[in-house]
Image (cartoon, helix red, strand yellow):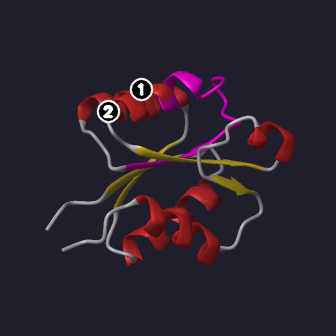
């Protein structure tokens, strides 16, 4: 069985906790990172299969993290409440806030291999 792990790069604790709970109910081990710096440290410490990344974080743009995660083979889904900003990250999978948990899980299931 392939381990499925996710980094949730989100500074809004309520959103991050809800996303983590939903991922864990789907068999994915989730780690919450409230900043780009935390996410970079987590990625360097342990690779992940998926990163869900908010585009508005307290310590700046997540572009370097997104590039680093993709270079390590992680799938990336970006999230934002700003549809124009979000569109700039296509062709990555996009989640416009507020989003339904069902829609988020559908994108996650498309991105990650099915657990054996």
Q: Which mark is residue 68?
A: 1
Q: In this view, does 98 lie to the left or right of 106?
A: right
Q: Can residue 33 be seen in this view?
A: yes
Q: Name the residue under label 2.
A: 72
- Is 32 part of what is drawn in magenta? no
Residue 100 vs 43, above or below: the answer is: below
Q: Quadrant of residue 56?
A: top right
Could you tell me how far apart the alpha carbons at marks 2 and 1 are, in whole angstroms? Answer: 6 Å
Q: Is residue 45 left or right of residue 95?
A: left
In the depicted view, which residue is nearer to us: 19 or 13? Answer: 19
* Residue at left offset 37%, top offset 61%: 112
Residue 46 vs 4, above or below: the answer is: above
Q: Within 10 angstroms of label 1, few (less than 14), some, or many (20 or more) residues?
A: some
For the residue labelled by badge 1, is the local secondary structure a helix, a strand or a loop?
A: helix
Question: Residue 96's x, y, as percent?
Answer: 75, 56
For the residue labelled by badge 2, is the local secondary structure a helix, a strand or a loop?
A: loop
* Residue at left offset 84%, top offset 47%: 83
Question: Residue 54's x, y, as percent?
Answer: 64, 43
Q: Give the magenta range.
A: 50-66
Give the position of the N terminus as an image quadrant: bottom left
Q: Within 10 angstroms of label 2, few (less than 14), some, or many (20 or more) residues?
A: some
Q: Is residue 82 visible?
A: no
């Amino acid at each position: 069985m392939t381990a499925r792990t996710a980094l949730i790069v989100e500074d809004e604790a309520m959103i991050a906790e809800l996303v983590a709970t939903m991922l864990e109910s789907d068999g994915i081990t989730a780690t919450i990172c409230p900043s780009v710096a935390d996410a970079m440290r987590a990625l360097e410490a342990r690779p992940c299969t998926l990163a869900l990344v908010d585009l508005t974080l307290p310590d700046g743009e997540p572009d370097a993290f997104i590039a680093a995660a993709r270079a390590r083979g992680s799938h990336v889904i970006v999230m934002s409440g700003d549809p124009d900003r979000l569109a700039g990250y296509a062709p990555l999978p996009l989640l416009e806030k507020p989003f339904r948990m069902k829609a988020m899980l559908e994108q996650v299931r498309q991105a990650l291999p099915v657990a054996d």
